[in-house]
Image (spheres, coloured by chain):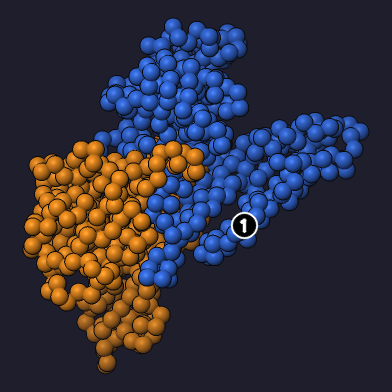
Chain colours: A blue, B orange
Amino acid sequence: MDTIRIGIVGYGNLGRGVELAIRSNPDMKPAFIATRRDPASLQPKTADVPVYAYDTLEQHRNEADVVILCGGSATDLPQQTPTLAKWFHVVDSFDTHACIPEHFTAVNAAANETNHTALISCGWDPGMFSLARLYGNCILPDGKDYTFWGKGISQGHSDAIRRVEGVQDARQYTIPIQAAMDAVRNGEQPELTTRQKHLRECFVVAKPGADLAKIEHDIRTMENYFAEYDTVVHFISEEELKANHSEIPHGGFVMRSGVSGENGEHKHLIEYSLKLDSNPEFTTNVLVAFARAVARFAAEGSFGCKTVFDVPPAYLSPLSGDTLRATML
Amino acid sequence: MDTIRIGIVGYGNLGRGVELAIRSNPDMKPAFIATRRDPASLQPKTADVPVYAYDTLEQHRNEADVVILCGGSATDLPQQTPTLAKWFHVVDSFDTHACIPEHFTAVNAAANETNHTALISCGWDPGMFSLARLYGNCILPDGKDYTFWGKGISQGHSDAIRRVEGVQDARQYTIPIQAAMDAVRNGEQPELTTRQKHLRECFVVAKPGADLAKIEHDIRTMENYFAEYDTVVHFISEEELKANHSEIPHGGFVMRSGVSGENGEHKHLIEYSLKLDSNPEFTTNVLVAFARAVARFAAEGSFGCKTVFDVPPAYLSPLSGDTLRATML
C-alpha cells in the first residue's frame, strides 16, 4: 500500500496530537491541516504541510486518503462528520454515548451515498474500552461489566466548575474508588452506586475576595456533575494550578467478572486498563491506527459507517498477515 | 440466524468445557461429540447428544455448523484440523507458537479447497493475549511489549516433573515476578531476563523411599523447563496435592508501555489481564465465542484459514450492530 495521506481537520489538542502521532507511523504522512480560524494564524509542527480554510475543503477532496476530524462532540462533529463523509473517508472521536446511534445513522447515509468509508466514536472511551466491554461480554456471557475512569482530568467537570460564580480557574480529577475495584476483582459482582465508584477531587483558583464556602457549596451540590458524588474541593493559587495541574492525564479500567462450570463454580476476571500521561495524545494514537483500517476498507470497496466493533484487528497494523501470525499470535 | 449447531471433537477438559460453555449461549446447541475412544464409554453432561467415533466423522458432515477441535497441539491438531476442515467449518486452539505459520498454511489449503472456514490458535494465549499485543503495538508504535503468565498451573511443566525419577505426581505454578511488573508499570521499559520475569514453584509427591535431594536437583537443572528460572520445590503428600492443588487456575498480563509527544515526553501503559479459576473452561468460552464468528464468515462465503486477528469483534456477539452501538460503544 502507498503512503496513507492523512488530512487533519481542527488544530486544537487533538489535531496537534494527530500531527505528532503520524510521525510514529512511517506508512503515513500529513496531507493538510484545515481550520475554521485564519489559516495564516496556525503554526504547524510539520514543515510544508498546507493549511486550508475549513470552508474550502471540498476543493481538496483528492488530497487526502483519510481525514481525521479533531473537533468537539457537542457541536462540531454532528455537523462536520456527515458533511465531510461526502468528500472524504473519515474518522472521528464522537464521544456523546447517548447520541451515537443518531450520529451513526447520519454519517452512514452520507458515506453510503457517495461511496465513502467512515469510522465514528474512535478513541479510548468510546473506543478501546468499548472493545474491552464487547470482548468481555462475548467471552463471559454469565458475568457483569464494570467501567472505572481515572485517575484523570475530566474536561467537562473542570469547565462546569469554571462557570461557578467566584471561580477563576479549576481542574477536576475523577478518581476510581479502590474498595469498589477490589470488590470487583474478588469476584463479588457488587451492585455499585455512582458514589461508590468514583470520587471527584477539585483544584480551584478563586477570584480575589470570592466567598470560598459558597463556591465549595455550589460545586458540591451541582446536579448532574457533583451532587451524586463525594466531592473534595481544594483552593489553590494560580501558580500552583499551573505548576502541578497543567497536564491532561487520564485512564481507567474495564472489568468483566464472570463464571463458568456446571454451577458457576469457577470465577474469571478480565481486566483492561489504561494509564495515560496525555489523554489527547493517546486518543489521537488510536485515531491514527484506525485511520489505517479505514484506508483498507476504502481500498476494498467496503463503504458506509463503521465503528471499532467492525474492524478486524489486523487492519490496524502496517504488517502483513504472515508477519503478524509469526510475531504476535 | 438459526441456532448454531456445534460439533465437539475430543472429550477431555476442553471438550467438556465446550459442552458447558454452550449452555451460556442460547443461540447455540451441541450437535455431537466425537471421540477416538469407544463412544459408548463417554458420559456426556447433555441429554440426547449423539457420540460418534472420530473415524466416522465424514458421514456426519452435515450435522454441525461449526466443529470445535478439543485435542492437543503436539500430535492431535496438526493432523486433525486440516483433515476436518475438508468437511466442516472448524475452530482449534493450536498453541505451539513457533509452528503456527506452518499449521496455518496446511489448514488454509484444506479449507480453501472445499470452501470451508477455519479459525486456528484461539484461546487466551494464543488468542486474547495475541489481540492485546496487536492492539497495543498498533496504538503505541513507540513502545515495548511485555507478557507475564500466572499465577497458574503449567501443564507442560507439571508433566516434565512427573517424568523425573522418583516422582509420583506433581503440579507446577508459574508465578510472575512483582518487581518486574512494577518496573514495566512505572514506564521504565526494562530489559528483563527469563529469570527476572517468572518464578517456578513446584509441589511434588515423591515415591516412597525416593532421594528427595536428587529429585530437587533434577528438577532445578532441567534444561528448557527450569534451568533458566529460579525454582522452588516443595515435597508434599498425595492427600495434600489432591486437597490444595487439583484445580487448574491460570492467567497473566499483557502490557504495552509506550510514549507520545514531541520528544516522547508522555508515557502510556496499556494492560490486559486475566485471572482464571479454570484455564480450560475459560479457553473453551473463547473458542465458543469465536465459533459464532466462524459461522458468520461461512454464511457470507468468506472461506480459508483465519485467526483472531481477522475477526471483526462484532462477529463474536449474538447482538445486532444497532444493539451493540447503543449498549456497549
Q: Where on the picture, by quarter, is residue B137?
A: top left
Q: Quadrant of the N terminus of chain B?
A: top left
Residue at the image point whose x is 27% and y is 52% from the top: B4
Q: Is residue A220 left or right of residue A208?
A: left
Residue at the image point whose x is 20% and y is 62% from the top: B32
Q: At numbered mark 1, what does the secondary structure look like: helix, strand or loop?
A: loop
**Amino acid at dot 1:** Leu
**Residue A72 in view in this figure:** yes
Q: Label 1: chain?
A: A
Residue A133 position, x and y percent, is 46, 48
Is B249 or B191 nearer to us in this picture?
B249
* Tag 1 residue: A192
Above or below, A271 against B42 in this view is above
**Residue B181 in view in this figure:** no
Q: Residues within 10 Å of mark 1 (few under 14, many from 20)?
A: few
Residue A156 position, x and y percent, is 66, 35
